[in-house]
Amino acid sequence: MTNNNKQLVVLGSINVDHILNVPAFPQAGQTITGQHYQLAFGGKGANQAVAASRSGANTAFIACLGSDAIADDILMQFTQDGINLQSVHKVPEQTTGVALIFVNREAENCIGIYAGANAFLDKSYVKKHANQIRQADALLLQLETPLDSLLEAVKIAKAAGKMVVLNPAPAQTLSTDFLQQIDLITPNETEASQLTGIQVKDLSSAEQAAQILHDKGILNVMITLGEHGVWLSQNRQGQHIPAFKVHAVDTTGAGDTFNGALMTALLEGQGFIDACYFASAAAALAVTKAGAQPSIPWRAEIEKFLINFK
């Protein structure tokens, strides 16, 4: 299916990921030797913008970079990925955001983040780029940039009658006032647990958590459950979308890939179920390679994967 030129705006973070593969996560005071090191471009906002663009969405990005040397490399990569960069700017005398990532042999990760230039994506920055949001058909957000800027972006989007999708990651507490304005929320188990107080560990707890999110005023809920797929709940009607079985190498960026590809499918007019399968296929491909952005698949790969699984 080709894109019908509906536009997506992603507002969010840009990070440089330093990834170290280790046998097991270090204990306090312990030094461990890694088997593999990789520097890759990441940040939840950037990953989701790249995933949306590579999977076929007409994607614009609102974000802040540092004024360091690596910023130019990142901009060049975004250009190759076909992202509209008119609302991406360098912040003088700031470093680009950084993520330090350990990946263990089970392909689990633990991550430390330094915001750097991401902290400058504030309310005034969003106001300056309000037209970009008004001209788009949908707005996709995460939680790696200042919360007041997200509130401002949502206000602009809702006033213009646009669809607002929130990937509430990294997990944090959010006000019901904010959540009521979200059309679709896409937490993973940890984030859903934090938002609802329900320990999400299986389908029935995912269903309970989804109902609480509906109670907070959100019509559409997708709780991603890793290898167990997705719990999709629309207007209180829930169903399980199973995951594709693949050999996972590194799960970093899988959720971001899911969110970006999901937006592509939704903007092309696919229903939530089909969009979920399309996004799950993209995420399945992403976990078979190392790194966040290097592992994000292109449209042709996703379509080939889906054909092979039918």
Image: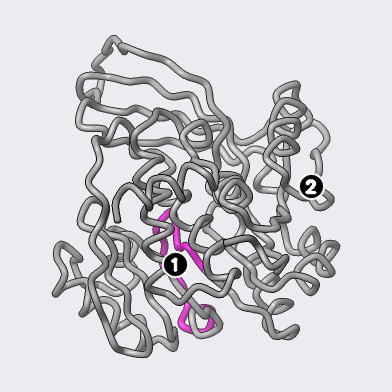
Identify residue type, mark 2.
Leu
**Quadrant in which the N terminus is drawn:** bottom right
Give the structural element (helix, strand or loop) at label 1: helix
Q: Quadrant of residue 11?
A: bottom right
State how far apart marks 1 and 2 are (Cα): 26 Å
The overriding secondary structure of the stretch rendered in magenta is loop
Q: Position of residue 179 (x, y in %)?
A: 49, 79
**Residue extent of the magenta highlight:** 166-178
Residue 103, relative to residue 120: is it above or below?
A: above
Residue ID for mark 2: 85
Q: Nearer the viewer, residue 117 or 187?
A: 187
**Magenta span includes 174:** yes
**Magenta span includes 242:** no
Q: Quadrant of residue 64?
A: top right
Of discs 1 and 2, which sits in the foreground? Answer: 1
Q: Nearer the viewer, residue 58 or 22?
A: 58
Residue 264, relative to residue 266: is it above or below?
A: above
